[in-house]
Amino acid sequence: MAYHEFTIRIPNLFRDALVQMLTSKSCLGVIEHDNEVIAYFPETIDSNTTSRDLTILKELLKKTHRNLELTFDHSIIPDQDWNESWKKGFTSLDVGKLFTILPPWEGEKSGRINLIIDPGMAFGTGHHETTRSCLVLMGKYAIKSSKDRFLDLGTGTGLLAIAASRLGYRQVVALDIDPLAVEAAVKNVSLNRIENVLIKTGSITDVEGSFDCIAANIISSVLTFLAPEISSRLNPSGVTILSGILAEQADEVVKAYELTGLMFIENFPDDKWVSLVFRK
């Protein structure tokens, strides 16, 4: 079977919305670079429909933001070149002083905490700014807190849950409302030969007990909605790390969590995104 490849150049401000749209339209996976998104679709899709959707998005962007533009190219990739196309897009990435994210076909780096992620799925590889920020902050605060239980909300590929296990948390719980994300997380946890991660379909209300650290890399509106529940699930002196927040949304999220009694500790910026840290 052949595959459709769409190379889309779009301003970073709209990249996440684009990836979400592509994923909802049978996209097999995406490779994200600084200035473009490469999306893959099965041969069975109607590529004209995808091209039409992107053209409509292009015109909407032009009308609402005259100085911003979307362009795209389409090509067909033969079946035998599929794996090589993925491999070209994914190489190892050092994150902070501790972590290295790498695909299964690359050798592990000595002296680093290696996180193996299979990129053949549409849930990200850890190269996004918000995920990198979470990893840096997890490493920083793991030194300063108890490491009994860790909760990863919106786990996606399971990357943060795997990192928590490698940092020494005794029990790690990973949650996602998308069953396909849960399936991806299960696969990656197995690739990393980890046995202390419990992966479930659902949200925070579907687990019991409290946690020493809660990480949530979700959109800000969901983070704000979950503020009372996240606060109530933190152990005394527990820490929560929140990401997926645009810089202009940070104040709203801070206010929501301070109203629950949490203390704001740190604002960690990365490009247009910020990650926030709160303590019980």
Image (tube, grey):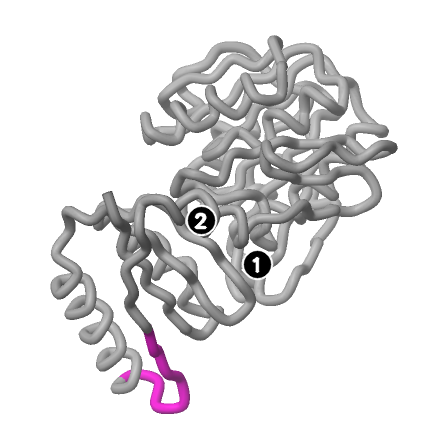
Which residue lies at the image location 45% right of the left edge and 51% below the top edge? Answer: 85
Marks 1 and 2 sit apart, C-alpha to C-alpha, by 14 Å
Q: Which residue is mark 1?
A: 251
- Regarding residue 147, the answer to whether it shows in the image is yes
Q: Quadrant of residue 53?
A: bottom left
Q: Is residue 194 left or right of residue 13?
A: right
Residue 100 placement (x, y as % from top left): 72, 40
Whether residue 68 is in magenta: the answer is yes
216 in relation to 62, above or below? above
Taking depth in this image into account, of 277 and 57 the one nearest to the observer is 57
Q: Which residues are magenta?
A: 64-72
Residue 255: tell me if it is visible: no
In this view, 201 is above or below 76: above
Q: Is residue 11 magenta?
A: no
Q: Quadrant of the N terminus?
A: top left
Numbered tag placed on residue 11 in the rendering? none
Report the quarter where the C terminus lies.
top right
Task: Examine the residues drawn in magenta and state their main secondary structure.
Answer: loop
